[in-house]
Image (cartoon, rainbow, N blue to C red):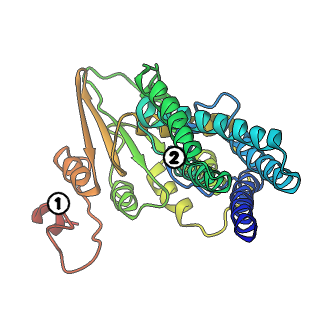
Amino acid sequence: MQLITVKRTLLKVFLVLFAITLTVDVYLQATRHASLCSTASCQVVGEYVRFGELMLVKAGAIFFWVLWLLVFFAGRYDKKWLWGLVTLVLMGAMAFDGGLLGFQFVGLGEHCQLCMGVGAALFVVVALFAWVRKSWLMLLLGVAVWCGGFAANSVLQFTTQLPALSETAFLSWPESRTGGTSNHIPRYHLFFSLHCGHCSKVIANLAVNKTDQADWTFHVMDGQEEDLLRLSHILSAKMTAENPFLEILHWESEEQVPDTAIPESLREAVEQATIYFARSRFSGVPMLIADERPGVRLVLSGANSILAYLHQEGIIRNVIHFGAPRDEEDDPLPAEALEGS
């Protein structure tokens, strides 16, 4: 009898712990626009949930609280129909989680840490439940149900449309050009983060050079509320029209950011940029997509390759040094460019 009590207590404690974990995540998302899962994958997966990422996490928290209540009453009254109800609910959850992760892993190619944590928790719950009921067939049933859901969504082909590159930009510069030109003007699409030192290195070098001989679009995947405030100030600043690179450096370095209205179009652009970046299998920022002329597009990743390319194209002439003495591995620009800076 004592062993049975210990088994049931372990099951209830684990259910409470994970119910609290998901409840905390719901609180963070609802009040602080943050999450226990900080990866871009969580944001991408959330875009494909019909009723939103927050509601999915809420449903998960409610599920674990309800399951805890069922286990509590089943243990208290020891009724077969209550234990049968627990089995039914748990197997349904395993099927749902398997299908959800199957769509993520294979359909989207994403790995949401929070969703994987829920899946791992369900496997632990099934194992503890099988231990309580003294039926390892229950564990095999749970694994089979989960694998069935995962396999079903793995073999199906889902159409996940890639956003147009133009839809992912929160800022285009310059806004307009005076006079016509017979030559094609290159367009550079810069993907960066407000929390990336390598991105700041690229942007700082662009800020001290004449860059209006090309068209620029700016793309960012920083979706936290404070990041959106910084981006809103960049959009509304008067100096952005003259030198957006300098404004980006200014606002990313500000410790305190005043409240301001965040345009809905900005939120949408950040979401679209996150989806575009993840679905295109890009590895990291800074990244530059260079449309040199019709039909010719280059993709450059990393500060060194971007700076070397922009120097070759004549965009970067004045150079900001980062660290001394000069290390050729850290600074890809040729010596003659450095001497003139």
Left or right of residue 299: residue 18: right
Q: Judging from the image, what secondary structure is the residue with disc 2 in?
A: loop
Distance Cα–Cα, label 2 vs label 1: 38 Å
Q: Quadrant of residue 13?
A: bottom right
Left or right of residue 57: residue 277: left
Inspect the image, locate mark 2, and give the three-letter code of the amino acid beneath it.
Cys
Residue 188's spot in the image, x, y percent? 34, 37
Quadrant placement of the N terminus: bottom right
Residue in the image at 42% along x and 39% along y: 278
Which of discs 2 and 1 lies nearer the camera? The answer is: 2
Q: Please tell me the numbered disc located at residue 145.
A: none
Quadrant placement of the C terminus: bottom left
> Would you say the residues marked 2 and 1 are in contact, meaning their CB atoms lie under 8 Å apart?
no
Please state which of residues 236 and 26 is positioned toward the viewer in this rendering. 26
Question: Badge 1: few (under 14), some or many (20 or more) residues near its Cα, within 10 Å?
Answer: many
Residue 304's spot in the image, x, y percent? 23, 57
Q: Eyeballing the image, is 184 above or below 327?
A: above
Residue 18's spot in the image, x, y percent? 68, 58
Q: Eyeballing the image, is 215 above or below 233?
A: above
Residue in the image at 67% along x and 56% along y: 132
Inspect the image, locate mark 1, and give the three-letter code of the amino acid beneath it.
Leu
Please state which of residues 132 and 94 is positioned toward the viewer in this rendering. 132
Q: Quadrant of residue 89?
A: top right
Residue 119's spot in the image, x, y percent? 56, 47
Residue carrying label 1:
333
Q: Quadrant of residue 256?
A: bottom right
Residue carrying label 2:
112
Please state which of residues 329 and 121 is positioned toward the viewer in this rendering. 121
